[in-house]
Amino acid sequence: MSVKLENYNGKYKIVSLALNSEVRDDLLSDNIDFLYISENAIRLYPEDIVISEDEKVIAKLRNAHNYDVYELWENGRLSEYYDDSSMDNYFFVTAKCNSNCIMCPSPDISRQRGGNTSVNTLIEIAKHIPADAPHLTITGGEPFMMGPDIFRFFEFLRDKFEDTEFLLLTNGRIFAIDSYVQRFIEKAPNNSIIAIPIHGSTHATHDMITQADGSFDQTISGIKKLLKAGIHIEIRLVVSKLNEKDIPNIAHMITEEFLEVDYVSIMAMEMTGSARVNSNKVWIPYKDAALAAEKAALILMEKGIDVKLYNFPLCAVKKEFWTLCEKSISPDKVRFGETCEKCKMRKACGGIFAGTISLEKGELRAIV
């Protein structure tokens, strides 16, 4: 949710939301900035000053939730950062990345020139998020492009969120360096899992997709060192035209070298950013991607490795694999085709990405 407070002329702030006096008093005791939404005014605390009496904005914020977290910009724009009713909340560390994956849903320019969120801002946001949040993701870009300062952020998260599950999305290359593995062990939240993609069973395929020489060797080395240190790992396989035939080979490699992983997620692409620009090179119909995913899933499950299928509509997947399918697409990005209206499995289906639906050529079908 994003709204505009027309008369605000203050500084940039991170603010929580209070919709009743009980939550207002709770947030006051936390000594943080927050907005109290009364029936006729929006008040900024702890100053206790009215910053808006716009009835439309008040009504809109009334549909939000207590303890939601927003960025309040100098121009009065109020942008939601954390939704207390959602399991899909994340810290966006940086848009930069030291790989340049050909099917990345972000554009090249973001990975090359994107900015960092300062560690102080990330910590300030974390201060506002309730300590009992069930799940938080840390993502980018490549979060470790922030540099060693990221460990100060990890340490704050570790100390505040004792029971929260953290998912760290990274290409894993940094963990080829022993000192980063050790610092992660020392500073990371206790309930953390690291999600790392493998794009090929050989350096030729993986490095061709990442467009970064040496990335395969670094990633494989990083995974091995993390597993040896007892860190929980999720391996991700993104199916594209470039590695469709190799996905089962990657599965075999995982069973031979990484049996200790917590689970493997096999994913259909989000066709935005570089993926959209390179669609003629990477796009693969859902049925073909699902076939590769199903072959890999059987190989992994036969060795006792848990498997999840992400971003696949149920109609593209054989029925015996439906229990592996996750509703993995963020609600604001989910789309369904016209034929989905009469599908009896629509409520159980995760749909497809908004950025992908224009490439879908009659594959979606109603399950009746």
Image (cartoon, helix red, strand yellow):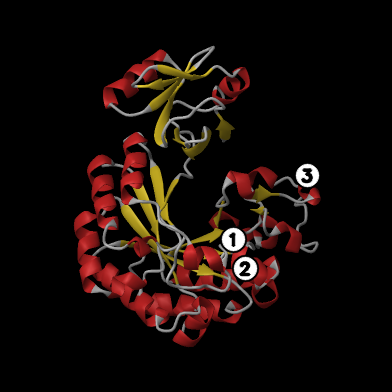
Q: Residue at x 53, y 12 (%)?
A: 39
Viewer-nearest residue: 260 or 80: 80
| Residue 350 image position (x, y, % from top left) | 62, 50
Judge depth for marks 3 and 1 and give the one in front: 3
Q: CA distance from mark 2 to mark 1?
A: 26 Å
The residue positioned 50% from the left and 69% from the top of the image is 237
Residue 290 seen anywhere in this rendered image of the structure = no
Bin the neighbour count of mark 1 within 10 Å (Cα to Cα): few under 14, some 14-19, many 20 and up: some
Provide the secondary structure element on which disc 2 rests: helix
Q: Where is 272 relative to 16, above or below?
A: below
Marks 2 and 3, Cα distance to the nearest angstrom?
28 Å
CA distance separating discs 3 and 1: 22 Å
Q: Position of residue 187 (x, y in %)?
A: 22, 55
Residue bearing the label numbered 3: 341
- Residue type, label 1: Phe
Whether residue 308 is visible here, answered yes or no, is yes
Q: Secondary structure at mark 1?
A: helix
Q: Nearer the viewer, mark 2 or mark 3?
A: 2
The kind of residue on which mark 3 rests is: Glu
Which class describes the residues within 10 Å of circle 2: few (<14), some (14-19), or many (20+)?
many
242 above or below 345? below
Q: Which of the pair 182/153 is nearer the observer?
A: 153
Q: Quadrant of residue 363?
A: bottom right
Give the side of residue 49 with respect to residue 56, left or right.
left
- The image's mark for residue 321 is 1
Quick check: 333 above or below 37?
below
Closer to viewer: mark 2 or mark 1: 2
Q: Residue at x 67, y 57 (%)?
A: 355
User: Disc 2 marks which residue?
Assistant: 275
